[in-house]
């Protein structure tokens, strides 16, 4: 699996020599974001390996979503380095990040209500029959078929993919958003509170999809407030507090109470001591 | 339920729950309105509205009336095609009427004949410079550029200064009308060359409208441009997060609306054989009304060109029907206003119903 990893990057774009990229799919070093005087994200060193499911936890305003917006290039980072899939990256915008293989399921569903499932899956990267700039002809058939394959991969069943999003339930919408990641064989999936607005059954459905991704060895970053869900689905938990990382915990070495202690600020791991 | 692999999700899909497309409702409304006028005319005027009642003219339908209905809406219909796309992105264009007036004035001044009945046309705007009897391509290109430029300015302001489309296009509406009056100090511009006059002669406006409607129907349905137009109107934040360059797309949409305004101006001035600074007053509202009656949602993202064409036909039938009943134009305007409000109420109701269902 390490074949497409470029381990010989040199110069300023090289990772620290003490930490070769190896099978790391995403690494950030010193990632920082300021909104004017507000330091929303400070000096974050984070990494996720292939096949790993990592949870990001933290209180509201701790910097979780800000972190996601930097690595998906929805916003431009103030400082710091990012390596993705063995390459130093500085994406121009969200489309470039998606094309490189980072797929995001946003907290606010990034779906267009009046479009159907294939249209939403391919929004911004439509399959074209003839390229005529903005007036390129769409290949609806290819997009429908790719959509069906993507839905099969995630085990999502939607009876009529040509139904518009506005006619679907919250769970179905979330499934469509998640299926978007499967359709494009993403290298890293990020989910920002995918079940926050869902009922019990719908949450179970989304969690099953996440398990399917795990079985297929797809790496995942999951932002969630739900401790049971995180313990069920993830290998590792990284805790944010006031814009900084304050703990990096393997699931086996921790429990719910311990994690809460880090979230609330009762505890900080020694190596992140500057965070307090 | 049993058809989901995870056993949950409530993925019920009941065909009977699906609402008919808005266009079907519009088409039914069109038929109903025609039937009402037919009955009113039979009772009140003892004549048929649509059918041919004269023995010396062949044909089942009253062809002259059908032609008038389509002809009188085709020019505003061309504007409505652009306004439809603007509304689909969740915007609005109030400038189209003024853009038509201004473009008509400018284009017409490059289309004037040098001689009328053997006399020098000394009142031509550019007579002194000798810019008369120019090939028809010159006024046409100038007219198209003029409309496009107005749309481009609208689009740039809306996309890059983030001012609401209502304000940006309101400004253009006032400024373009001012420019139209300034151009000749309020004097009409008349006597085009025969080739310019032929652009809007006879049923040409209808043919041009039909071709443009088909073209933009195909563009909206089958191209990336169309898909992004709907996506932006449907959920602008989602479109941006999906990597669509929303600002650039909006500029394109408003520019195309301006181009269509330019086409309408050329056809209108050619048909009337004159251009006046007051041309196209209130056309923007009529165009918006056609789109709204045709089921284009003012909140964006929903509606089709077919809907707008049907909306334009409803508009034409109502005006023609009132004229046939010999009702005053005042009544026509009052009823027109009521119909616009009614169409928006209907749209809101439809949206609430579909939101409640999901």
Image (cartoon, coloured by chain):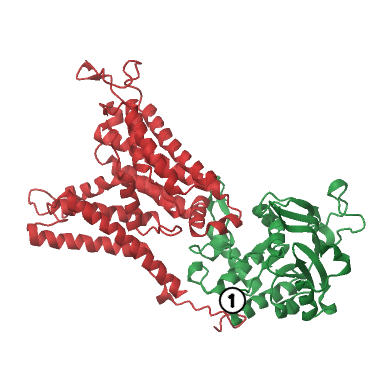
Chain colours: A green, B red
| Residue B307, x across and y down, in percent | 35, 57
In this orientation, does residue B24 appear?
Answer: no
Which chain is indicated by disc 1? A
Total count of labels? 1
Q: Is residue A223 above or below residue B127?
A: below
Quadrant for the N terminus of chain B, please. bottom right
Residue in front for this viewpoint, B46 or B248: B248
Rendering quarter of residue B127: top left
Residue lying at 33% horizontally and 33% vertically, measured from the top left: B104
| Residue B326, x across and y down, in percent | 12, 51
Residue occupied by mark 1: A198
Rendering quarter of residue A213: bottom right
| Residue A43, x across and y down, in percent | 80, 57
Element under disc 1: loop
Residue lying at 72% horizontally and 52% vertically, measured from the top left: A77
In this orientation, does residue B189 appear?
Answer: yes
| Residue A126, x across and y down, in percent | 58, 55
Q: Is residue A271 above or below residue A39?
A: below
Determine crowd level at label 1: few under 14, some 14-19, many 20+ residues with C-alpha closer than 10 A.
Answer: some
């Amino acid at each position: 699996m390490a074949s497409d990893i470029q381990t010989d990057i040199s110069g300023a774009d090289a990772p620290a020599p003490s930490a070769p990229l190896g099978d790391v799919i995403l690494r950030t070093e010193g990632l920082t974001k300021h909104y004017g005087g507000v330091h929303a994200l400070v000096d974050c060193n984070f990494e996720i390996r292939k096949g790993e499911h990592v949870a990001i936890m933290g209180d509201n305003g701790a910097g979780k979503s800000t972190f996601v917006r930097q690595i998906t290039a929805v916003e431009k980072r103030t400082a710091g380095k990012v390596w993705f899939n063995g390459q130093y990256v500085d994406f121009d915008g969200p489309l470039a990040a998606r094309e490189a293989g980072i797929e995001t399921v946003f907290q606010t569903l990034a779906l267009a209500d009046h479009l159907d499932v294939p249209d939403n899956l391919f929004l911004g990267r439509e399959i074209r029959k003839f390229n005529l700039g903005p007036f390129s002809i769409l290949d609806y058939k290819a997009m429908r078929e790719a959509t069906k394959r993507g839905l099969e991969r995630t085990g999502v069943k939607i009876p009529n993919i040509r139904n518009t999003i506005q006619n679907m339930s919250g769970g179905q919408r979330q499934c469509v958003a998640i299926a978007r990641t499967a359709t494009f064989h993403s290298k890293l999936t990020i989910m920002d509170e995918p079940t926050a607005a869902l009922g019990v059954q719908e949450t179970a459905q989304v969690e099953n999809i996440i398990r399917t991704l795990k079985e297929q060895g797809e790496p995942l970053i999951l932002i969630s407030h739900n401790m049971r869900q995180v313990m069920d689905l993830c290998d590792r938990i990284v805790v944010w507090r006031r814009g900084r990382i304050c703990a990096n915990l393997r699931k086996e070495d921790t429990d719910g109470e311990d994690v809460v202690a880090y979230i609330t600020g009762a505890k900080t791991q020694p190596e992140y001591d500057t965070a307090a | 339920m049993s058809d989901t692999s995870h056993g949950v999700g409530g993925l019920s899909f009941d065909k009977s729950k699906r609402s008919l497309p808005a266009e079907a409702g519009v088409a039914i409304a069109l038929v109903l309105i025609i039937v009402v006028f037919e009955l009113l005319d039979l009772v009140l005027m003892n004549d048929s509205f649509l059918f041919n009642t004269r023995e010396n003219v062949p044909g089942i339908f009253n062809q002259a009336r059908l032609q008038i209905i389509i002809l009188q809406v085709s020019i505003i219909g061309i504007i409505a095609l652009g306004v439809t796309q603007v509304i689909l992105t969740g915007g609005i264009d109030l400038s189209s009427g003024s853009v038509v007036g201004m473009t008509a004035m400018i284009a017409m001044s490059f289309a004037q004949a040098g001689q009328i009945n053997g006399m020098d046309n000394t009142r031509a705007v550019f007579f002194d410079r000798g810019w008369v009897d120019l090939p028809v391509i010159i006024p046409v290109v100038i007219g198209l550029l003029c409309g496009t430029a107005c749309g481009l300015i609208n689009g740039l302001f809306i996309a890059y200064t983030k001012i609401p489309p209502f304000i940006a296009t309101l400004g253009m509406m006032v400024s373009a009308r001012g420019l139209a009056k300034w151009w000749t100090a309020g004097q009409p511009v008349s006597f085009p060359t025969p080739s310019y006059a032929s652009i809007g002669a006879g049923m040409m406006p209808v043919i041009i409208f039909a071709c443009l409607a088909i073209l933009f129907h195909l563009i909206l349905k089958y191209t990336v441009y169309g898909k992004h137009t709907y996506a932006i109107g449907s959920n602008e934040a989602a479109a941006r997060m999906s990597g669509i360059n929303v600002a650039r797309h909006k500029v394109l949409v408003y520019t195309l609306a301006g181009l269509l305004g330019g086409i309408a101006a050329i056809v209108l001035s050619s048909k009337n054989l004159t251009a006046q600074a007051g041309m196209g007053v209130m056309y923007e509202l009529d165009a918006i009304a056609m789109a709204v009656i045709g089921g284009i949602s003012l909140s964006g993202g929903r509606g089709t060109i077919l809907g707008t064409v049907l909306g334009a036909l409803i508009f034409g039938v109502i005006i023609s029907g009132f004229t046939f009943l010999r009702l005053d134009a005042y009544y026509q305007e009052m009823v027109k206003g009521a119909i616009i409000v009614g169409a928006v109420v209907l749209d809101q109701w439809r949206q609430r119903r579909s939101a409640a269902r999901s």
